[in-house]
Amino acid sequence: MHCLYFVILTKEEDSTSLDARKDAQSTLIQENFCQEGFFGGGKGDWFVIGGRWSGVFSWTLLGLNPMKKKGFKKSWKKAGIKTPIPYIRSVHEYDGYEDDAMILDKKLWEALVKKYPDVELYDADNYDERFLRDFEEKELLGRWIIAIDYHG
């Protein structure tokens, strides 16, 4: 089953979305998120940045549902989002897309907690994993949040 997962990183260490996405990849690999072998004990057996969840931060901010395609493309363009609309993206783009990592601000925080409270989030700076709803806003604001699609 494919699952949505979030990684949070300190902004000072990564200056661009691509830096943050690559940092999230290397962090998950170093922390054995996906272990190989017959009795591997990682969280999943495979992951990719964004994947089936690519664009989740943008569509959540816009209050859109990518499963309802009617009007989606128009709303996406009207919002000025430069990345491709989610349902035409490659779900195997290893580095994901520009909006698969964003600086977490109050508006995004509130939208994510409302829509995805039960998604797990890994705070890579503090080695802490909890459900999104169990974090306090002040712990996360101003840091990079990265969307991960993993198979578990």
Image (cartoon, grey):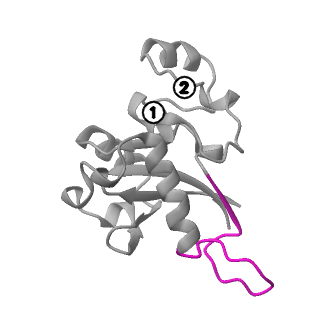
- The residue tagged with tag 1: helix, strand or loop? helix
Question: Where does residue 68 sit, x and y in percent of width and height?
Answer: 61, 27
Residues at circles 1 and 2 in contact by the CB criterion of under 8 Å: yes
| Range shown magenta | 31-48
- For residue 15, which quarter of the picture? top left
> Which residue is most to the left?
138
Instruction: Quickly name the residue at label 2.
Output: 83
Q: In this orientation, which residue lies closer to the viewer: 139 or 14?
A: 14
Q: Position of residue 47 (x, y in %)?
A: 65, 59
Near mark 2 (Cα within 10 A), the count class, few <14, some 14-19 or many ≥20, is: some
Dot 1 alpha-carbon crowd within 10 angstroms: few under 14, some 14 to 19, many 20 or more: many
Q: Which secondary structure class fits the magenta region best?
A: loop
Mark closest to the chain's N terminus, 1 or 2 = 1
**Position of residue 67 in the picture relative to residue 5 (left or right):** right
**Between 39 and 125, which is closer to the camera in this rendering?**
125
Amino acid bearing label 2:
Thr
For mark 1, what is the residue?
58
Residue drawn 56% across and 37% down? 97
Quadrant of image for the N terminus = bottom right
* Residue at image location 56% in from the left, 20% down from the top: 72
Query: Residue 89 at what x, y percent from top left?
Result: 67, 32
Q: Quadrant of the C terminus?
A: bottom right
